[in-house]
Amino acid sequence: MAQTAPCTYLETFDQHTGGWWGWGGNHLGLQPLVRENGVVTSRSPWWIDYNHAPPGAGYIHMLYSLNLRGPFSDHHKEIAGPNPFAEQKYPLDFTHARVSVRVRGELELKGAQLVLLVQGRVGETVSGWLLTGQPIAVGPEWSEQTIVAAPDESQWTCLKARHDRQDFYGFHPLQTILSNVNVNIMLVLFPLEIRPMGEIRGDPHLLRAGRDYPVWTSRLPEGYVQLDTVRIDFAAGGAAP
């Protein structure tokens, strides 16, 4: 029987990073976020996530990530710290959830936007959806902004997968994923302009940008984002499986 879950999740980063983690540039993998005075910071350079290169939706920078359910490896626990979301079994049904963040920073976006990403697993396939219709603005002064995870595909972009990752990433309907976001949520920068540095024979999307060939980093977003608060108000009746 489903367990009744709290209807509001709140993380202020006052005690720890709350299970949130970052992804370091230059293929460093999972990295702890910098936390000071109840604020976590993510700074460039960020890793180019090429798992969703065309024919997927494109490349992303992962700034802030939260896995919503365990079990977690010892390495993940060391990087991300305690995870109240998973421990207290907050709802996985994000349909019509209101996600509020208090942010500030300085970004040279280079055509990208800071957006929410939700990911859920159905069978063996993970499907990710970007809320591209409701980007989060980042400026030098603190601002609180609220986005709503409405099941309206016109506001979202499905990430899908690059040619050799379609056994793991793929498409499932938005409503299916929103009703059971059982993998993670992220704040990411999308889309990225990937321009190879030098000549590439053939289709560069068949290779791994930044790993198999160098790219012009001047075309990529630069700067930092600070996150003070994350609040998620779930729709009434949310339950945790």
Image (cartoon, rainbow, N blue to C red):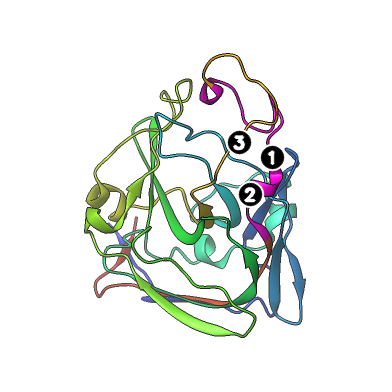
Q: Where is residue 45 in the image (x, y as percent from the top left)?
A: 73, 51
Query: Relative to the observer, which residue lies in front, 188 or 138?
Result: 138
Q: In this view, does 73 lie above or below 225?
A: above
Residue 18: x and y in percent read: 63, 67
Amino acid type, callout 2: Leu
239 displayed left or right of 231: left
Q: In this rendering, is residue 43 above or below 97?
A: above
Classify residue 168 by image quadrant.
Answer: top left
Report the magenta residues as a range.
Answer: 204-222
- The structure residue drawn at horizontal position 62% and vertical position 41%, both measured from the top left corner, is 48
Q: What element carries label 1?
A: loop
In the structure shown, which secondary structural element does the residue marked by tag 2 occupy? loop
- Residues packed near mark 2 inside 10 Å, few (<14), some (14 to 19) or many (20 plus): many
Q: Where is residue 95 in the image (x, y as percent from the top left)?
A: 27, 63
What is the CA distance from the residue labelled 2 to the residue labelled 1?
A: 8 Å
Tell me which residue sits at (29%, 59%) in the image: 2
Residue at image mark 3: 195
Residue 220 falls within the magenta-colored stretch: yes
Q: Looking at the rendering, which quadrant does residue 36 occupy?
A: bottom right
Q: Mark 2 points at which residue?
A: 220
- Which residue type carries mark 3? Arg
User: Which residue is pictured at 44% across the width and 63% down the height?
Assistant: 89
Classed neighbour count for the residue bearing mark 1: other residues with Cα under 10 Å, few (<14), some (14–19), many (≥20): few
